Amino acid sequence: MKPSARDIARKWGTRIWRGWIRPILFVVIILGSFRSAVADWNDVPTGSMRPTILEGDRIVVNKLAYGLRVPFTPWSIVDWSTPQRGDVVICFAPDTGERLVKRVVGVPGDTVSMVDNVLLVNGRRIACTADTPETPLPDWSAGRPRAGTESLDGRDHAVQFLPGVQARRSFAPVTLQPDEYFVLGDNRDASRDSRYFGTVDRRQIVGEVVAIAGSLDPSRHYLPRWDRFFEPVE
């Protein structure tokens, strides 16, 4: 008896499912779960973390830095650490849900404030070399970027200031409640961060940025920045 068109279609459908769709779906689920719960990589489109992270950098995110989550959910299975001052993290803005890369400057229990771009944590002024006159820096009056080095709990990192643009350079003291974190961009005058959308909940922090996998320069036709490949993020 000659097989019907329906039987032929069913047979080919089974072959396609077993030979193509099922293996591809399996790989997608495994890879997606890995990126969701273990490690991920993200392309950076803006300069809010300059000079630490540049536009066109591809960053490596350790999703296991603070604990293990159920893949594709914000639910935590187990936590073995918490974000610390100075960590560069991937988080979600509490107002828009936008994925961001920022630096943690305040942890639960801290009181954070800023006066004329000088960061204060628990009433203590955070040292920044950009404030010292002996440091050779571009002229403020020229409106060019002013670079420096800030130190949080003995961990140094680069910061940048843009005196020629409008920015929120001062804010009143904010005391962080349990599971609340205060995040800032290293490019202090060109970053949308906790100064604008408030504190970030622990569940909105999904991992720590540990390295730059590669970098393409959008201002130079996306030519590679070879000197930034495999650089650790401090």
Image: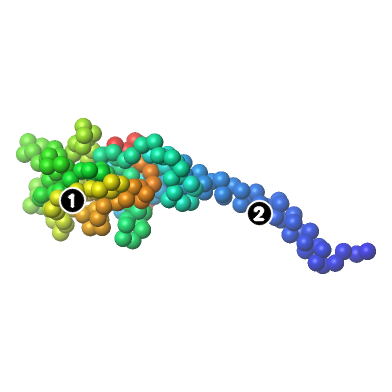
Q: Secondary structure at mark 2?
A: helix
Q: Is residue 80 visible?
A: yes
Which residue is most to the left? 133
Q: Earlier in the sequence, mark 2 or mark 1?
A: 2
Tell me where residue 155 appears, x and y as whole percent. 23, 34
Q: Determine which residue is flagged by label 1.
A: 174
Q: Which mark is residue 96?
A: none
Is 178 situated left or right of 224 in this image? left
- The amino acid type, in three-letter code, at marker 1 is Val
Q: Determine which residue is flagged by label 2.
A: 21
- Considering depth in this image, is 103 or 174 the residue closer to the camera? 174
Tell me where residue 57 appears, x and y as whole percent. 36, 46
Tell me where residue 152 appears, x and y as whole percent. 21, 37
| Distance of label 2 from label 1 (alpha carbons) | 52 Å
Which residue is most to the bottom? 5
Is 36 situated left or right of 164 in this image? right
Which residue is most to the front? 178
- The amino acid type, in three-letter code, at marker 2 is Ile
Tell me where residue 139 appears, x and y as whole percent. 9, 47
What is the quadrant of the C terminus in the image?
top left
Q: Secondary structure at mark 1?
A: strand
**In percent of the image, x 56 and y 45: which residue is there?**
30
